[in-house]
Image (cartoon, rainbow, N blue to C red):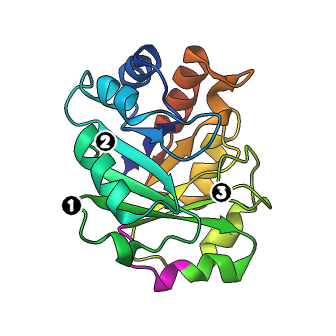
Amino acid sequence: MLNTVRVKICGIKSLEIARAAVDAGADALGFVFAKSRRQISPSKAQKIIMELPPFVSRVGVFVDTVPREVQEIVNYCGLDTIQLHGEAQPDFYRGIRCSIIKSFQVKGEASVRAALNCSADAYLFDTYKNGLAGGTGEVFDWDVLKIVNFQKPVILSGGLNADNVAQAIKTVKPYAVDVSSGVETNGVKDIEKIKAFITKAKGVLIK
């Protein structure tokens, strides 16, 4: 059976962009609660999330945030999923009733195989860059993900844009793709780029 890949637009900071992404076909929206130029406050995120239609996944992005604080934000904002970056391990967050994505920065085969010992519900693979927990805007060698037979969903991130996402999907055949900087212009989300990215991503059929 052929399927289309799921698409997450990350770094949402306004209702306008959230609505545009959903209208374009986004399956999930990411809200960054860690320190970043894309960081959003829980109160602002909650206001946006309250206006979203059903069946759109609300994902909170955290970097080594203590479980108690994550739980508070999950409850306050109504998140479906948490995405963990940094050293945080899913086992410490199992008391939180939502799905858990664990991010891995790809430096080679060993960093990819590390996911096999992780208890997350899905794995996100991003480009390694010293000093950054994510959002590098740079691609890595997608072929490295083909050496492991993952038993859980794989989310591909790192330097994706409308020009390369179709090839990335054909190479990796991921469950989902995750984009932030690749749909921005001068650091700001660009509605036309979001539309183009989703159109290209959804245009690829995979088994």
Marks 2 and 1, how far apart at CA = 14 Å
Foreground pick, 63 / 17: 63
Amino acid at pointer 1: Arg
Residue located 33% across and 61% down the image: 68
The quarter of the picture where the C terminus appears is bottom left
Marks 3 and 2, how far apart at CA = 22 Å
Amino acid at pointer 2: Ser
Mark 2 vs mark 1, foreground winner is: 1
Q: Residue furthest right?
A: 130
Range covered by the magenta-colored residues: 115-121
Residue located 36% across and 64% down the image: 67
Residue 82 can be seen, yes or no: yes
Foreground pick, 52 / 25: 52
Vertical side of 2 occupied by 147: above or below: below
Residue 4 can be seen, yes or no: no
Q: Can you identify the residue that label 2 sits on?
A: 57
Mark 3 vs mark 2, foreground winner is: 3
Marks 3 and 1, how far apart at CA = 24 Å
